[in-house]
Structures are given as C-alpha cells and as structure tokens.
Amino acid sequence: MHQHHWGLSADPFPGWSGLAGHFPVEEAEEALLRLRFVVENARGAGVLLGEAGLGKTHLLTVLAQQLDPRRHPVLPLRFPQLNAGETLHYLARELTGQREHSSHSERGLDVAVGEIEQALDDLAGQGVVPVFAVDDVHLIEDLGVLQVLRALLDLRPLGGPPPTLILIGEGGLRTHLNRLPSLADRVAVRCELTSWSPHETADYVLHRLCFAGAIRPLFTPEALSAVHDHSGGIPRRINRLCDLALLLGFAEEAEVVTARHIEAASQECSGIHRRRAA
C-alpha cells in the first residue's frame, strides 16, 4: 500500500534480508571472514557475540549462503531449552534426516551417539564436514548441552576433520565459556558485533531504500540523523523506526520522511514497549 506512494517495488525494511540485501558493514564483514576461516580450515569452534538486535542471526544466514552447502552444510540449533540428552537426539535426527523416532525414553543416549558417529562417517566419506550453528547460547541453562557440543569436536570421522561449531549469543555466552574451559580452549576465533556509527546507519537506510527501488531521496538528512539518535545504531530498531516512519509519512501524503516522522515513530515504538511491559 504505502510502497506505491513512495515509488518502491519492495519492502525496504522487512526486518530480515538474505544475501542479496545484505549490508556490508566492515565489522560484520570481518566477522564473516573469520567464521569462514574457521569452517573452511577445520579450526574447531568460532564464537559470534553481540547484544539483541545487532544482526547475529542474519549474519549466520549470510554465512550459510556463502558456504558451499555440498561441502559445509549448516545445521542450526535454536532450542536453548533442550537438555543434554534431548540435544543429542535432536542432532542425530538432523544428521540422519530421520524425523520419526520413538520417544527419547525408549532410545538410549548411546543409540543417539552411535547414529551421530555413523552419520558423520558417512558424510566424511562424501567429503562433507557439517557446521553446527547454535543460536541463543546465552539462554542455555544446562551446561551439559555445551559439553555435548564440545564432545563433537573430539570426533574424527573416518580420520577426517571433526564438524565445526559456531556459538552465537549475547554477553552471557562469555560466562558459559568461562565456566567450561574445555570448550573455551577449542574456540579459534571470537567475533563481536557492536552498534553502528551515524554514518553506517545512514548508509544502511539509503542502501535498503535503493535495494527496494527508490529513485529519489526519501529521507531528509535530518531524518537520517534522527534514525541513529533514536535507534542507537541497532539494526533491528533502525528497521522498525524506518518502516513505521514510511507508514506515517504515507498517511500524511508527505513527499519525504522528516525528523518529525522519526520522532513520532520512536514515540509509538516506545509506547508499544511500555504496553508490553505492563
């Protein structure tokens, strides 16, 4: 609806974007390079740190798209509430592709371990080294889960390299690593995402608008500055502010998005947060 008003052919701020719409911030590009090094050179484990909204999960998606899926398929694990035994069974299902299994109580952990070892041997025979990507590691309460993941790095499928482990999370991930030195010692690289500068924020907004088909300036310079001020340079907040500001500008039949629209969008987002907290 409002896309037509602004002369856009796509949604510029959908809250997610694949490789085609990836914005190459220097810090994120360095993290991608380092994580690819870990995967492609069998260096064990890599860590990606960053607070909520900085694009960690998006960066994992980009990494998976950059890697050769025939050589390094990425297997995501996004269920931090699982315990160690459930994690083993989950990994076995992901590796074998057998979704229908009897209950965990009927299948011992030794069965799951055997399935994982056999699957890794089979993959190694095909020249495949999987990547286990664990998101929201800071939310994991059972340290046994991390011990299971560390044990994966000790496997030597058919004499080849073990699978790669990518751990993704917020600051609590550091605490987990400090509590489990045997895993921390296997981490080859640590990458951390931080909030964007005013220049990076403005460039991102313009990048997304251009990607969506904009052929004229849609945000005033003051609006771009206000986006950074109200978002703190956090990508998720930038998307939310800009998306809502475009809607507010459309409702007014405005020709451009101004700092006033950004201010109004910020107040509305803050109101939503307050209502949710209440």
Image: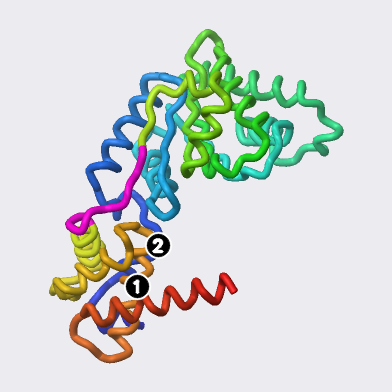
Question: Residue furthest toward the top?
Answer: 159
Q: Amino acid at mark 2?
A: Gly
Which class describes the residues within 10 Å of circle 2: few (<14), some (14-19), or many (20+)? Answer: some
Q: How many marks?
A: 2
Residue to which mark 1 is pinned = 243
**Left or right, 137 with reference to 56:** right
Q: Nearer the viewer, residue 275 or 190?
A: 275
Taking the spot 48% from the left edge, 34% from the top edge, the residue there is 174
Distance from the alpha carbon under mark 1 to that under mark 2: 9 Å
- In this rendering, the answer to whether 217 lies above or below 175 is below
What SS does tag 1 mark? helix
Question: Residue furthest toward the right?
Answer: 106
Q: Position of residue 28 (x, y in %)?
A: 30, 43
Residue to which mark 2 is pinned = 15
Taking the spot 41% from the left edge, 45% from the top edge, the residue there is 50
First in residue order: circle 1 vs circle 2: 2
What colouring method underlies this structural image?
A: rainbow
Q: Amino acid at mark 1?
A: Asp
- In this rendering, the answer to whether 59 lies above or below 167 is below
Q: Position of residue 29 (x, y in %)?
A: 27, 40
Q: Position of residue 252 (x, y in %)?
A: 28, 91
Q: Position of residue 85 (x, y in %)?
A: 73, 32
- Stretch in magenta: 192-200
Q: Are marks 1 and 2 in contact (CB under 8 Å)?
A: yes
Image quarter for residue 118?
A: top right
Question: Residue furthest toward the bottom?
Answer: 252
